[in-house]
Amino acid sequence: MLVDVGGKSEGVLPFRELSLAIDSKLLKVGDTIEVMVHRIDEMDGTLFLSERRARALKTWEKVIEAHNRDEVIEATVTQVVKGGVLVDLGMRGFVPASQIRRQPVGNLDELVSQHLRLKVIDLDHKRHRVVLSQRLVLEEELQAKKQELLDTLEVGQIRSGVVVRLADFGAFVDLGGIDGLIHNSELSYSRIKHPSEVVKIGDVVQVEIMKFDPEAKKVSLSLKHALPDPWDQYADRLYETNKLTASIVKVTPNYMLVEVIPGILAMVPKGEFDASAQFVAGQEVEVTLVSINHATRRITASIQHVADVPIEEIEKYAVEEEIGEIGTVAPAPPEPLPEQ
C-alpha cells in the first residue's frame, strides 16, 4: 500500500511490515496509520515504511516505563515456542513456561489467543528483547490477598472455607488465600482416626478461628466448634441412672472409655465392668450413667449397673488426658494406672 507521510512522494508499506494488531483487509483509503521510515532507496529515493517497527519502537518505550514503575502489562499469546510462549505487546515478548502460572502448565497450545497479565523480569536493550512473567503477578496478588485476610482474622470468628488437602493428622482448609489446619481433634466431637471420616477434598465448611500467627501466616481452625455442642444438644439424656447403649472406644485393665452419645465419652472404671469378660473397641454395650459433671464434662458409667460404688473409687481412676475436654485426642497414660 502507498502511504502519504508528507514527503515529495508516497512511501511504500509492504503488508509484511504490518503488525498482528492490524488486518490489512480492513484498511481503506483515507485511514490514518502510524509508521516509521526504515529504509530509503538510494537510486530513486523511495521511502520504505513499517508499521510493525513503529509500533515496536513505541511499545519498547512503554515496556521500559512499565518495568521502571513495576506495572502490569496485558498481552495476547500468539505462538508456542520452545520453553514457553510468545506474546504480542506491539512487539514480541517471551514468557517462559515456568512463568505462566503458579502451577505447571500442561498443554501450552491451549494458551494461544488467551490474554495474560504480565510483568517485565528481563530486558535486552541492544536486541530489544523482553522476558515477562504472569506468575510474578499472580504471586504478588496472592500475597496481598493473604495479608488482607490476615488483617481481618480474629480468634472466635466463623469463616467459610474449602477443604483442599487431607493428612493423617488433620485437614487443610483454604480460607480465601490462606490455608488453615483443622487438627483431627477439632474435626468432630467424636473420636476419629482419619479426617476422611468427616470431610473430603472440595467440601465447603464453616470453621472457627482458634488461633493464628500473623508472622508465620499459620491459622488453626476448628470444625466442631462451629457445630452444635452435643452436651447442649443431648442435655435431656445426660442424667444419672439413665441407661444408654454405648460404643466401646478403648479398653484397659483399669478402665474403659465408651461413647454414650456421638461426641460424648464416659469412663467405666475398674469394678464397674467384668474384667474377665472380653471387651473390644467398637463393641456395643449397655451402660448406666453413674455420675455427671457438666462443668468439667466428665461422665462415669457402669456396665454392671452397680450404683453403690463409692464416688472416691470412681474418681480414683479418672484420667484427665483421656476424658477431660470432650473429643480431645491426647496421649494415653501409662498402663496400668498407678494405684493411689
Image (cartoon, rainbow, N blue to C red):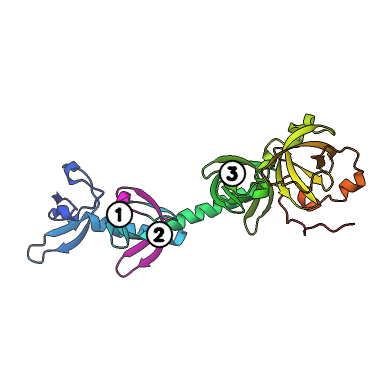
Query: Residue 204's spot in the image, x, y percent?
Result: 56, 40
Magenta-span inclusion, residue 128: yes
Magenta-span inclusion, residue 306: no
Give the SS element for disc 3. helix
Which of the marked residues, 3 or 2, is nearer the chain's N terminus?
Answer: 2
Q: Residue at x 30, y 54 (%)?
A: 90
Vertical order, 53 against 191 (above or below): below
Proximity of marks 2 and 1: CB atoms separated by less than 8 Å:
no
Q: Which residue is mark 2?
A: 99
Query: Residue 262's spot in the image, x, y percent?
Result: 69, 38
Q: Which residue is mark 1?
A: 90
The residue stretch that appears in magenta: 106-134
Query: Residue 295's spot in the image, x, y percent?
Result: 84, 41
Q: Residue at x 47, y 53 (%)?
A: 138
Q: Nearer the viewer, residue 257 or 13?
A: 257
Q: Amino acid at mark 3?
A: Glu
Query: Residue 158's spot in the image, x, y percent?
Result: 66, 40
Q: Residues within 10 Å of mark 1 (few under 14, many from 20)?
A: many
Give the SS element for disc 1. loop
Considering every residue shown, the one lying at the far top of the view is 236
Q: Which residue is mark 3?
A: 197
Which of the marked residues, 1 or 3, is nearer the chain's N terminus?
Answer: 1
Q: Amino acid at mark 2?
A: Gln
